[in-house]
Amino acid sequence: MPYLYEVSWAEAVPNLLICLREGLEAGLVVTILLAAVRKASTAERPLSATPVWLGLLGAVSVAASFAAVLTYSTSVMSSSAQEAVGGVLSVLAVALVTWMVFWMRRTASTLSKQLRGEVTRAAAIGVGALAVTAFLAVGREGLETTLFVWTAVKASGATLAPLVGATIGLIAAIVLCWLLYSQSVRLNLGVFFSRTALLLIVIAAGVLAYGLGELQNAGLIPGAQWIAFDLSAHIDANSWWAALITGITALQPKMTVLQVVAWAVYLIVVLTMFVRAGATAPQPAAPKPEPADEHEHAGDWFERIAGKRLAVVGAALVLVPALAAGLAIALLPSASEGSVQAVSITSNSCAPEWSSARSGSQTFSVKNGSGKAGEITLVNADGAIVGEIETIGAGTTADMTATLSRGSYTIKCAMSGQAVTSSATVQVSGTADAPPAVKPVSQDDLTPANDAYQAAAAQALGRLTETLGALRNDLHANNIAAAQADWLTAQEQWERVGASYNSFGAAGTAVDGLPGGLPDGVNDVGFTGLHRLEYGLWHGQGAAQLLPVLDKLGADIATVQQNLSSTDLAGDPTNLPIRGHEILEDALRDHISGMDDLGGGAAYPLTMADIDITRTVISGLGPLLDERAPDLRATIAARLDTLQRTLLATQDGGKWRPPAQIPHAAQQSVKAALGGALEVLARVPRLLEVPAAH
């Protein structure tokens, strides 16, 4: 079997476990139903097991139909729509699996008795009702399994391993159930379900993080640019240990803060509740004799309708889901809008089969025979991306859907460790309209803007150094009021350097660090810089204590000036679009929240300084933004103007006041204006993202 040797078994394990457990649950239900039928059967009134098997077949039909609708419906969607649907269904799958784990924990001890009672009741009504009972008992397991496996396959990046794992898990579950039914083996089911539940919770946490990431990529929830960590440049995704961690936990080398927090909170909360549920699980009550009642076997309405109509019920259970799925697929946008084009990737070629196309929706079925994982993009004549597969695994096939208008297009294949290859350029005819494409940027594109930003930052550092001289004179003269005013000027100049979110590393922390996390807090010898001066100036400290701090601050600023153009500080152009959003996001986190206020009460003037450097960054990026979103710069400028007016409105006679002295309504207006600015600034990193190197 080609490429089987390239299957990542780490990615196969989660679906193997899911299908083994869910298949075993469904198999146990079937086993209990068959045993109950056999026990209820008498010589005077024999019962056949055929209704149970028909119900099982109907449940399989529902699961298969559901899988078909999921797969086909997403294949005709745009990339952002696929991300949105994948994210929503991933979160739903996690909710269902979590409920299933606790449901099994609660009802495992009484499940057999409950099902036997339902079989007895259904058998009294008729064989059709018995088929419905089996269908309902097994169908839930099938739908849960289908949804979770589908989301796990999406999370894996369209590799073959999850499907292989799911197949092995189902086969193992079927074999194990047959052995249990024939009493060939014994298995402590309570221990099995408890142990596998713990692993399922870990897997579900990863799927939850993946789903939230997809929703962020689709723009449905914020925070896509608030990165918790990005290890993609330091970790080989194809290494065995990275594949093991990613495959089992669904964690990725690059994750947002929301993904990490959701993963950790889900694990802590659900694992704690699961362990407590096991410790306090009630013992099953002693069985009570059930009174004989003529109405005991009356059944629900659907059971009474089914009655003895086994053939009709069996056909309905099997055919109705398939027909419903076919109707749903037929109502979706058809392939006539753009037929599926099969293309392949090898170690030295990219989509050689693609030679013609027409306008409208087009789906490419991309088969990766290169032996490497990578990224596939479809670009127009301007180099703008109109469709992409972010990750395609070795030996797998994945779909890429795009809407094409008149023009020329090329498929580009960026495989790990290899030079980028391209297909032939294909000319598309027709009159269909396509949504605007996003043209990727390169490091060279961003370099002029980054050079302009570095020049502005260097000027701000120069003014900061001059202000330190005035501050030194104030301290020598013991003029604390003047020193406080000059401190504010110095801090404003540092804000205009734009070193947000610790982007200058240790060098920036030495200049602008906070005492949080230090063993002795504000008294720690490691607490240095502008905020150390702020604390001293507003807490009665004089020249003897603050001049040494000022001397060290001057040396630390000189270090920043000398290394400003290094990639550890401001020398990496690819960080500039993120900086355009994070400067004011950092202002919200540090200034507006009061986190960095050590007595100066300067949140609003410092935010004004952040607006200045944000305007500088956006101005440098202007030509690139105008090419991709012509109206965005004007919108950003308007939002920044609103924020600036709102901040100035908090002044009293032209003088800044601490936020604590500002009316609550005015404080809320500042937060609202800042939120509005951040909303539009968040588009900048998405529009100007530099494609990852492969």
Image (cartoon, rainbow, N blue to C red):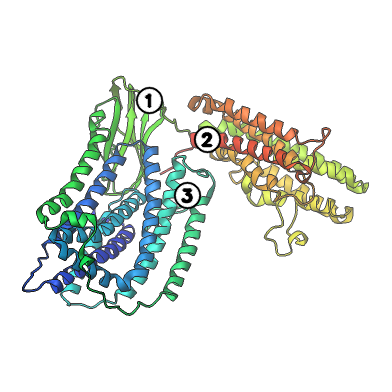
State the SS at label 2: helix
Between label 1 and label 3, give the one nearer the viewer: 1
State the SS at label 1: loop
Would you say the residues marked 1 and 3 are in contact, meaning their CB atoms lie under 8 Å apart? no
**Mark 2 Cα-neighbour bin, 10 Å: few <14, some 14–19, many ≥20:** many
Instruction: Name the N-terminal-most of marks 1 and 2.
Output: 1
Q: Kindly indicate the quadrant of the structure image that contains residue 178.
A: bottom left
Which part of the image, by quadrant, shows the C terminus? top left
Residue at horizontal 30%, vertical 78%?
287
Where residue 167 appears, as percent x and y from the top left, is 23, 58
Seen as rendered, the residue at the extreme bottom is 286
Number of numbered discs present? 3
Q: Which residue is mark 3?
A: 233
Seen as rendered, the residue at the extreme front is 294
Instruction: Name the N-terminal-most of marks 3 and 2.
Output: 3
- Answer left or right for 567 relative to 397: right
3D distance between C-alphas at marks 3 and 2:
24 Å
**610 vs 114, nearest the viewer:** 114
Say above or below: 573 vs 239.
above
Where residue 102 appears, as percent x and y from the top left, is 39, 65
